[in-house]
Image: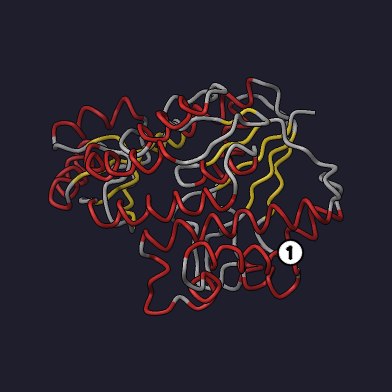
Amino acid sequence: MNILYVFPGQGSQYEGMGKDICEAYDTARRIYDAASEVLGYDIADMSFNNPNDELNLTRNTQPALLTHHIACLEVFREKTGGTIQPTMAAGHSLGEYSALVAANALTFETALRLVQKRGELMGAHGEGEMTAFMMAVDDIQPLAEEYKCAISACNQPQQTVVGGSSADLEALEAAVAEKFPRKRAIRLKTEGAFHTFYMDKAADLFREVLMEAEMSVPGIKVLSNYTGGFHDADPAGIKERLYFQLKHPVLWDANLMTAFGEGVARVYEFGGGIGTGEAHEKRPNLEGMIKKATRAAESEAVYIPVINRQTIEDAVAGGGE
């Protein structure tokens, strides 16, 4: 059976993230303790309590999300006795590093150090903002370029994220409202225009760190945000694509269609959460995109969230069904 593990990116963090699983499972608590030791600060406190709203700073968001991803994954593995094994993994932006951990290409500790530095550089050197348009990339791209903006992510056939300066995005949003009055535009809360030329300096500085990181050949296939297809098995090539990923669009819809083209039967999403309320009330970040892609691919794949204590218990009790 082809099984895909997926991991969400920034925007899926929330205050209290991970508290429920750490209270319920020793394995989760050990993951958080190990992460704190690597990072040099208490990631549990950062995730659970969000002191001074610092969880939403990119330098903290990225390691916090990776820790939550892997804590959910390891608890699920423990409770299922390792009987549910993926054949491929994917992650949206930051989530690609979690996918590489799931594939045993990166250790948890190495991935933490990488995303900590990645987040620091993106926050320190990033400029601009991002807006999600409910439009096809071919429709929005000419307008975006006219207003000195760039494509940041192709999430769905009718959802494209654009990055640019605040003023340029404002002008672009006004132009879209006039030309495509029925198309929604949603300004995102980020510290920069990620995955565009605004990240050139951060990417170049991060490249030095990335190239020195220890990486193994993945044990399963891992999808590349940069190409839309699978990474090859060469660690040096994976590092190059992670470098390019930082300043080029995330081809998420292409990632999903590549996976479904391989005959995926189940998709498990690990970590993060969106919406209001407590942890058990959160919704999975990638579910909507995955289900739309499932229908577009005419696939019968089953989607299963593993993002908090309740969904972990449900997934285990259902035997993955």
116 vs 194, left or right, is: right
Tag 1: amino acid: Thr
Q: Residues within 10 Å of mark 1 (few under 14, many from 20)?
A: some
For image coordinates 67% across by 35% down, the residue present is 4
In the rendered view, tell whether residue 282 sits above or below residue 215: below
Residue 183, can we see it? Answer: no
For image coordinates 60% across by 73% down, the residue present is 278
Figure coloring: secondary structure
Number of numbered discs on residues = 1
Quadrant of the image containing the N terminus: top right
* Residue in the foreground of this view, choosing between 63 and 183: 63
Residue named by callout 1 = 27
In the rendered view, tell whether residue 208 sits above or below residue 119: above
Residue 181 quadrant: top left
In the rendered view, tell whether residue 33 sits above or below residue 3: below
Q: Secondary structure at mark 1?
A: helix
